[in-house]
Image (cartoon, grey):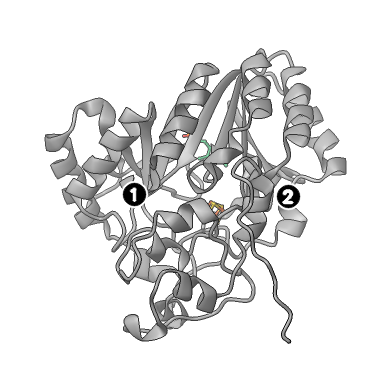
Amino acid sequence: MPAVVALSPPAAEDWQAQARAARMTTAELLARVGLTEADFPAGVIADPQFPVSVPPHFLAQIRKGDPADPLLLQVLARGEEAWPQPGRLTDPLEEADYRAAPGLLRKYRSRALLIASGACAVHCRYCFRRHYDYGSTMLTRSGEAEALALIAGDAAIDEVILSGGDPLSLSDARLAALIDAIAAIGHVTTLRIHSRTLVAIPDRVTPALIDLLSGTRLNVVIVIHSNHAGEISGDVAAAMHRLRGAGVTLLNQSVLLAGVNDAADTLAAHSRRLFAAGVLPYYLHLTDPVDGAAHFDVDEPRARAIEMELRAMLPGYLVPRLVREVPGKTSKTPLWALPEG
Ligand SMILES: *Cc1c(COP(=O)(O)O)cnc(C)c1O
Ligand code: SF4
């Protein structure tokens, strides 16, 4: 008799089990959404370097049997990725130039960014960090002391940003230790956490995390990374309300992605859903020229046209800032500040 493996779903509150349950093959992902390779004109591919990771909650928001589902397109490696992509880069932001200490990026005067974790709950096909060698750039326990000393020695830094990877893939205990160490630096007033985990595993908002964030003297901002209204489920909205109750300011950052959210009405619906969940739109990024992701690009003239439409549809506070990363600039660059071309 063949061995029978009992697959019981992880308990809802066990976010780490949900993170483990996210790992699957491309074939498993297709089977779970009721599709086959033949549903995609250019086929699908397997990327052993960056395996599929789709947590159960995110998977449940994907419309079954729809090869154009905007959530599915963010996590499925389509054949287009393997097409020749001349001029695409593996480190498009030239972040290697801004490494101030292992795991510390210092690009802007007042803000320091810690690459707190190399792990992500959900693996996004458009990610500019997918070619990263996290082993050499990530904050290690030994590098942490060096990074914190650098922040402590520079009074111009008033905000520390935890990024990654995804900092919320760290355990609550590890986050608590890191946040305490940052709070011990007198001139730091603000802690910012960038995370996509919250839309993939809303159960990540544990009581311990809420205690941690409401207990620190730091002013806490969380920037969630969401690209489509379909990601803001009732569970995600409830998690956002718990964070707001802890005094956290909630912002969202999106990437403008062809086939996912490159239409004004799609973006407007997203902004409204975010606002209903207590989150304000912050940035809408143009894609970076990362190798393998050209099929997500929206060119600048179209992006500007979509933004104009969006401005006519929404109050100003629900229109995200349309920006792109220009290597060497002292801030993100708004599209309006770039020459038209
Ligand atoms: C985007 C970014 C920041 C934060 O920039 P804001 O405009 O304040 O959101 C900080 N450090 C690095 C390296 C960044 O890429
Ligand atoms: S969560 Fe962010 S860093 Fe991680 S794969 Fe997705 S886009 Fe990249």
Q: Nearer the viewer, residue 177 or 184?
A: 177
| Disc 1: which residue | 230
Label at residue 138: 2
Q: Residue at x 30, y 62 (%)?
A: 258
Q: Residue at x 79, y 29 (%)?
A: 177
Disc number lying in front (1 or 2): 1
Amino acid found under the numbered disc labelled 2: Met
Q: Is residue 100 above or below residue 30?
A: above
Q: Position of residue 332 (x, y in %)?
A: 43, 40
- Which structural element holds mark 2? loop
Q: Is residue 140 found left or right of 267 in the rendered image?
A: right
Q: Is residue 255 above or below residue 233?
A: below
Q: Is residue 148 visible?
A: yes
Q: Is residue 302 above or below residue 277?
A: below
Q: Nearer the viewer, residue 156 or 245?
A: 245
Q: Position of residue 277 (x, y in %)?
A: 37, 30
- Which structural element holds mark 1? helix
Between discs 1 and 2, the one toward the N terminus: 2
Label at residue 128: none
Spatial CA distance of label 1 from label 2 is: 31 Å
Amino acid found under the numbered disc labelled 1: Gly
Q: Position of residue 232 (x, y in %)?
A: 38, 42
Q: Nearer the viewer, residue 334 or 249?
A: 249
Q: Quadrant of residue 37?
A: bottom left
Q: Is residue 107 visible?
A: no
Q: Quadrant of residue 341?
A: bottom left
